Image: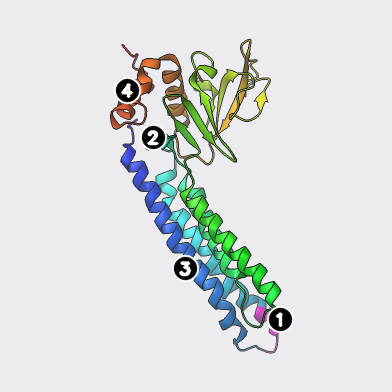
């Protein structure tokens, strides 16, 4: 098992954003222009059947192909992520970042651009309807840019774990149970961990973990979803355990030296 340098993950995210915006703009333009061509397309005797076939082949198929292209380009790079973090920031402080996986963010950006192009008013459209459609298209494009530039859903800082969803919350290191999550508590799409009951930012609490075990007194089980996060669950679990148990290592969080040192600790090396 080898670690991933922070710049590798950062480059992967940048490439995903650039390709997503490029494909999205192509889809936007195509969605705007095709209806003009389709309206002038010659009709056959069985116009309903031909119209449907032409619509699917000429309009729907290319728009479905664009997000599929993005997904295919990054499929291998995002499969079973190797241990490592990107470098990020939170509250003006260095942080380790687990970014949103390109396999979700990229196609979503492309689709939002395409839908925005599809709702742009064309032809003789009433003014009121045109205004609504334009506003909707602008909102969809803005949503695509927000997704593309959104902060990582998970960050590790000197103060704790930052979870970003509808809101961004910091879970202090001391809120986690001593020892942190263990290997058997991890799953490919989620990390089960114990934290102080009522901890904000970890979602709903659970009476038992995936194996049916109750939490320690004063603690609760939380399931940290990782399906949309580009991170190795086992490495993340060991990283949380390392920083929870070793406060002296936390100042190195968010640095190149820290991520490589962390890899040594996280694969089982006992800190001296």
Going by the picture, which residue comes out furthest to the front?
A: 92
- The quadrant holding residue 57 is bottom right
**Residue at 66 percent of width and 76 percent of height:** 52
- Residues under numbered marks 3 and 2 in contact, where contact means CB atoms less than 8 Å apart: no
Label 3 or label 4, whichever lies nearer to me, is: 3
Q: Residues within 10 Å of mark 2 (few under 14, many from 20)?
A: many
Q: Whole-Å distance between the Cαs marked 1 and 3?
A: 28 Å
| Residue hosting label 3 | 26
Residue with the mark numbered 2: 85
Image coords of residue 86 (percent x, y): 37, 37
Q: Are marks 3 and 4 in contact (CB under 8 Å)?
A: no
Name the residue nearer the viewer: 215 or 252: 252
Q: Quadrant of residue 210?
A: top right
Magenta stretch in the rendered image: 45-51
Q: In this view, does 133 lie to the left or right of 89?
A: right
Residue that badge 4 annotates: 264
Front: mark 4 or 1: 4
Q: Does the magenta stretch include residue 161?
A: no
Quadrant including the N terminus: top left
Separation (CA) of disc 4 from disc 1? 65 Å
Asked which colour scheme the image uses, the reply is: rainbow
Q: Can residue 176 be seen in this view?
A: no
Upstream in the sequence, badge 4 or badge 2?
2
Rendered residue at 39%/34% (across/down): 85
């Amino acid at each position: 098992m080898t670690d991933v340098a922070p710049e590798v993950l950062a480059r992967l995210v940048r490439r995903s954003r650039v390709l997503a915006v490029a494909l999205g703009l192509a889809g936007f333009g195509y969605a705007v222009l095709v209806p003009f061509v389709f309206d002038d397309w010659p009709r056959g005797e069985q116009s309903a059947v031909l119209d449907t076939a032409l619509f699917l082949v000429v309009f729907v198929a290319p728009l479905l192909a664009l997000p599929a292209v993005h997904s295919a380009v990054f499929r291998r790079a995002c499969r079973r992520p190797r241990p490592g973090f990107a470098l990020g920031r939170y509250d003006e402080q260095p942080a380790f970042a687990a970014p949103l996986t390109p396999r979700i963010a990229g196609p979503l950006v492309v689709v939002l651009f395409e839908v925005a192009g599809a709702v742009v008013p064309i032809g003789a459209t009433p003014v009121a309807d045109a205004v609504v459609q334009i506003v909707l298209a602008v909102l969809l494009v803005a949503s695509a840019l927000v997704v593309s530039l959104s902060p990582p859903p998970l960050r590790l800082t000197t103060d704790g774990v930052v979870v970003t969803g509808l809101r961004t919350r910091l879970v202090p290191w001391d809120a986690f149970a001593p020892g942190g999550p263990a290997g058997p508590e991890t799953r490919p799409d989620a990390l089960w961990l114990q934290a102080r009951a009522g901890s904000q930012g970890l979602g709903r609490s659970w009476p038992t973990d995936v194996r049916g075990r109750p939490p320690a007194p004063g603690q609760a089980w939380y399931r940290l979803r990782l399906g949309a996060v580009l991170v190795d669950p086992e490495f993340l679990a060991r990283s949380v355990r390392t920083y929870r148990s070793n406060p002296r290592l936390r100042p190195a969080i968010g640095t190149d030296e820290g991520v490589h040192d962390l890899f040594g600790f996280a694969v089982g090396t006992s800190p001296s």
